[in-house]
């Protein structure tokens, strides 16, 4: 009999209601974490790492403003973990992925480097992760781009129980709205729904029906397209036909650039 998928039923977090788990605590108390939204996970804690792997390696699935991410380095050695990643009370880091988010429109948005850190509550070397912490690397020369939430840290948690719960917590930047109509809340709602879906896919061993980018590597084509699109975008303003230039110019560009790559 086929397994029934747990409906996605998000709920705003409210510590006072007794159902929301207490917020994450940093060991030095340097950050104030805000639980924002939660839902029933619909999958066991053991599959959390598989579910968040999609979030780590494919952020473009959740934002049309992100082209892709590139892994700069990855480590499972605790001494190699950057000091800018906060130490969480009762949790131990097990893996860090240092990635770079590439924007779909580099002329408008900048790239952003980010640490993705998995934590476990277990003291065992092979402890099962239950927290994913995202930490943007921000400098005066590289502020947060528009496509990134206005937070200094964002955490996904899976809380053991019957049933297990997913919860998103944030360390918001000053004066960032947190109400249900705010951009941050809506972004976290979308991220939570995505993680809920990935967890279900991991539980039923979902496999993609179609494998893309088999002939031309995606990265090679995307990089060429961004360069050539910028070079030839003036054709849109010089279009003499009655047809839609935004459609036809870039469709032809796609075909031409594909031919360039495979030749």
Image: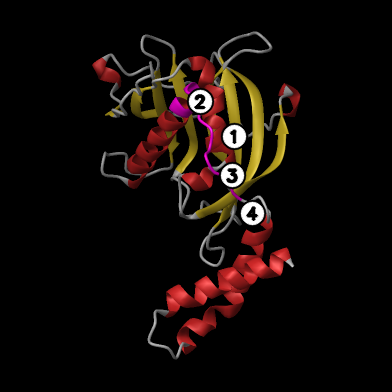
Q: Quadrant of residue 165?
A: top left
Task: Please name the residue that numbered disc 1 is placed on.
Answer: 116
Number of numbered labels in the structure image = 4
Q: Nearer the viewer, mark 3 or mark 4?
A: 3
Magenta region: 200-212
Q: Nearer the viewer, residue 199 or 4?
A: 4
151 vs 21, left or right, is right
Which residue does the image show at 42% across and 31% down from the upper left? 197
**Magenta: main secondary structure:** loop
In the picture, the disc for residue 211 is 3
Task: Give how far across and how far down residue 133 sits, in percent.
Answer: 54, 30
* Residue at mark 1 to residue at mark 3: CA–CA distance: 26 Å
Instruction: State the residue position of label 4.
Output: 218
* Labels 4 and 2: the sequence-earlier one: 2
In the picture, measured across the screen, residue 79 lies left or right of residue 115, that is right
Q: Establish if 212 lies above or below 206.
A: below
Decide which of 32, 116 is in the foreground and name it: 116
Earlier in the chain: of badge 1 and badge 3, it is: 1
The residue positioned 38% from the left and 29% from the top of the image is 34
Q: Which label belongs to residue 168?
A: none
- Residue of label 2: 202
- Sequence-wise, the earlier of marks 4 and 1 is 1
Label 2: which secondary element: helix
Spatial separation of the CA atoms under disc 4 and disc 1: 23 Å
Q: From the viewer's perspective, is the residue at label 4 or at label 1 nearer?
A: 4
**Residue extending furthest front?**
1
Give the residue furthest to the bottom: 240
């Amino acid at each position: 009999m086929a397994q029934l998928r747990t409906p996605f039923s998000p709920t705003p977090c409210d510590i006072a209601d007794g159902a929301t788990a207490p917020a994450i605590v940093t060991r030095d108390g340097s950050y104030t974490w805000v639980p924002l939204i939660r839902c029933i996970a619909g999958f066991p804690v053991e599959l959390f790492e598989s579910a968040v792997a999609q979030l780590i390696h494919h952020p473009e699935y959740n934002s049309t403003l992100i082209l892709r991410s590139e892994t700069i380095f990855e480590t499972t050695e605790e001494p190699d973990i950057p000091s800018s990643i906060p130490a969480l009370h009762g949790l131990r880091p097990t893996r860090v992925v240092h990635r770079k988010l590439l924007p779909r429109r580099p002329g408008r948005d900048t790239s952003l480097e980010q640490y993705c850190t998995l934590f476990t509550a277990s003291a065992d070397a092979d402890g099962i992760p239950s927290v994913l912490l995202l930490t943007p690397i921000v400098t005066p020369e590289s502020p947060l781009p528009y496509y990134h939430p206005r937070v200094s840290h964002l955490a996904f948690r899976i809380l053991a129980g019957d049933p297990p719960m997913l919860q998103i917590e944030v360390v918001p930047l000053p004066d960032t709205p947190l109400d249900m109509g705010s951009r941050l809340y809506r972004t976290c709602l979308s991220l939570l729904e995505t993680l809920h879906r990935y967890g279900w896919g991991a539980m039923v061993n979902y496999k993609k029906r179609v494998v893309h980018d088999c002939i031309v590597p995606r990265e090679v084509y995307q990089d060429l397209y961004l360069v050539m699109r910028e070079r030839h975008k003036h054709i849109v303003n010089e279009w003499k036909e009655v047809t839609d230039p935004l459609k036809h110019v870039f469709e032809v560009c796609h075909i031409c650039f594909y031919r360039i790559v495979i030749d």
